[in-house]
């Protein structure tokens, strides 16, 4: 039933459940599912290894769940690794504040999300999702997925170069079966175990030699040996050539060098970009010189490193209260609030013309009894009817006082129960019932007999009851 009390109760329960679930989601284990893609995560896609590596290097490192604009009054290096595209698109104002802070001398390290645009944690109200680099005023730089050429493409390219004018060389059936067997290899024991425990399988990597320029030359004069994802690594694309320091590597045979990391000056500060966040994740950080590169990007003498978890979604992930800000849940929340206000207003204010005031009756109980007696005296035989009703009412009252269920007004059963609890009252009741039955059998009872019977009935009612 839709009443004010029920609606208010439902709203209070929804708020309490939301608060409890939000606290549980924040206090729970952050190392599983999407929640592990942050500095808390210990799986292959988390950044816990990077966090502890900086601690071992005596670099002050912190985590913050609040929006980053509350951290900009300190000399820090802000690390935003794999920000959620949904939160970047819906909450870009904090990144704009970070951009202004960088212009005044701040340092921010950004690693854009590796996930594809089609895999969003929540539906976006606008498309395409915003790029965190553009929100940081780095509009001349973009990141994209680099697709190295496959073995078949390389073989076809080599065949075209070997036989430019003739027909393509035919492949024997044995060679085709070998290629198919290489493609359809069964998962190894380690990959099967990782899949069983929920840990993603090892990322296939390629070892590449990276060259450096700008600020990286003083630290890495001989370059770096990096382990990059073999399938779909992300690289930095400079739409317009801007000055900066870059880490480049050739990701395919006879290919052009691609930018994996860069440092760009922005005002008095700098924006550091790591093209592929997987280079800093637990699965690849310990491979070759990945840890050396990533820690160099983060470590700045005299500045603590602060990992931003707001854009990871740790403050809003699995929080039903955040749903109230997203469509269509926002419309549902407004409907619930509107219904609550409408029902409360309707309960407090009566619609329509005013109800006339109810006039109190001035008749007393004695007047009502006198009126009913005069009405009944007009009937032919009022005395038997009144005595029968009096007998039934007496048995109903005795049954109720004994605590028996309805329908147990049988005189014999009531007398048996009453005799065990109050023998004196049982005797008075038996006497009153006998007198009532005798008068009801009489064709013309006398007034004196009726008066004596009523006196006996009143004694059964007026006697104080004894508890069993």
Image (cartoon, rainbow, N blue to C red):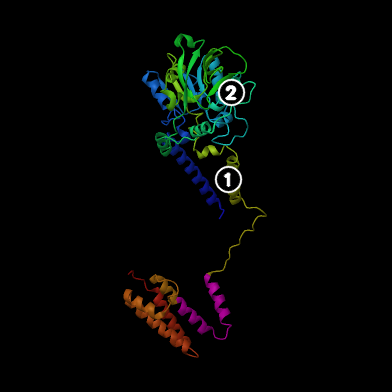
Q: Residue 402 appears in which quarter of the rendering?
A: bottom left
Other residues around mark 2 within 10 Å, as few (<14) / some (14–19) / many (≥20): some
Question: Is residue 137 depicted above or below 367 in this figure?
Answer: above
Based on the picture, tell me whether residue 373 belongs to the magenta stretch: yes
Quarter of the image where the N terminus is located: bottom right
| Total numbered labels | 2
Sequence-wise first label, 1 or 2? 2
Q: Which residue is depicted at the point 62% across and 30% down?
A: 128
Quarter of the image where the C terminus is located: bottom left
Spatial distance from mark 1 to mark 2, Cα to Cα?
68 Å
Q: Is residue 388 visible?
A: yes
Q: Position of residue 14 (x, y in %)?
A: 50, 45
Nearer to us of marks 1 and 2 is 2
Q: Position of residue 262 (x, y in %)?
A: 52, 16
Residue that carries the numbered disc 1 in the rendered image:
336
Question: Is residue 127 depicted above or below 340 in this figure?
Answer: above
Q: Position of residue 361 (x, y in %)?
A: 58, 65
> Looking at this view, is 298 or 268 the one in front?
298
Furthest residue in direction bottom, as rendered = 443
Image disc number at residue 159: 2
Q: Which residues are magenta?
A: 365-393
């Amino acid at each position: 039933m839709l009443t004010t009390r029920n609606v208010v109760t439902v709203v209070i329960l929804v708020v309490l459940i939301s608060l409890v679930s939000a606290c549980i989601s924040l206090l729970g284990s952050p190392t599983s599912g999407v929640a592990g893609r942050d500095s808390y995560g210990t799986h292959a896609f988390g950044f816990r290894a990077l966090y502890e590596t900086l601690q071992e290097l005596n670099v002050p490192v912190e985590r913050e769940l609040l929006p980053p604009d509350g951290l900009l009054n300190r000399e820090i290096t802000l690390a935003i690794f794999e920000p959620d595209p949904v939160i970047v698109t819906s909450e870009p104002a904090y990144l704009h504040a970070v951009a202004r802070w960088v212009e005044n001398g701040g340092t921010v390290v950004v690693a854009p999300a590796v996930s594809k645009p089609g895999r969003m944690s929540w539906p976006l109200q606008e498309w395409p999702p915003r790029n965190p680099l553009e929100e940081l005023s780095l509009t001349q730089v973009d990141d994209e997925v680099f697709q190295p050429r496959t073995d078949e493409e390389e073989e076809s390219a080599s065949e075209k170069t070997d036989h430019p004018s003739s027909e393509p060389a035919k492949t024997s059936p044995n060679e085709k079966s070998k290629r198919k067997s290489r493609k359809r290899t069964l998962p190894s024991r380690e990959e099967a175990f990782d899949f069983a425990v929920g840990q993603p399988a090892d990322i296939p990597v390629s070892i590449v030699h990276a060259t450096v320029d700008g600020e990286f030359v003083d630290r890495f004069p001989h370059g770096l040996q990096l382990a990059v994802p073999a399938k779909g690594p992300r690289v930095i694309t400079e739409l317009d050539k801007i000055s900066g320091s870059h880490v480049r590597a050739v990701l395919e045979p006879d290919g052009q060098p691609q930018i994996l990391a860069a440092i760009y000056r922005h005002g008095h500060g700098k924006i550091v970009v790591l093209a592929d966040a997987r280079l800093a994740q637990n699965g690849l950080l310990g491979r070759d010189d990945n840890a050396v590169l990533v820690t160099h990007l983060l470590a700045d003498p005299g500045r603590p490193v602060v990992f931003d978890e707001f854009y990871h979604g740790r403050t809003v992930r699995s929080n039903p209260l955040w749903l109230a800000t997203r469509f269509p849940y926002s419309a549902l929340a407004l409907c619930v609030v509107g219904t609550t206000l409408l029902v409360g207003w309707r309960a407090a204010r009566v619609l329509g013309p005013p109800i006339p005031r109810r006039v109190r009756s001035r008749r007393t109980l004695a007047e009502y009894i006198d009126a009913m007696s005069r009405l009944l005296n007009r009937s032919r035989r009022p005395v038997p009817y009144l005595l029968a009703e009096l007998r039934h009412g007496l048995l109903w009252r005795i049954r109720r006082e004994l605590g028996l269920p309805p329908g147990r007004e049988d005189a014999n059963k009531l007398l048996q129960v009453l005799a065990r609890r109050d023998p004196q009252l049982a005797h008075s009741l038996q006497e009153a019932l006998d007198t009532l039955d005798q008068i009801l059998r009489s064709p013309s009872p006398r007034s004196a007999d009726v008066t004596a019977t009523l006196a006996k009935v009143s004694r059964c009612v007026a006697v104080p009851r004894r508890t069993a």
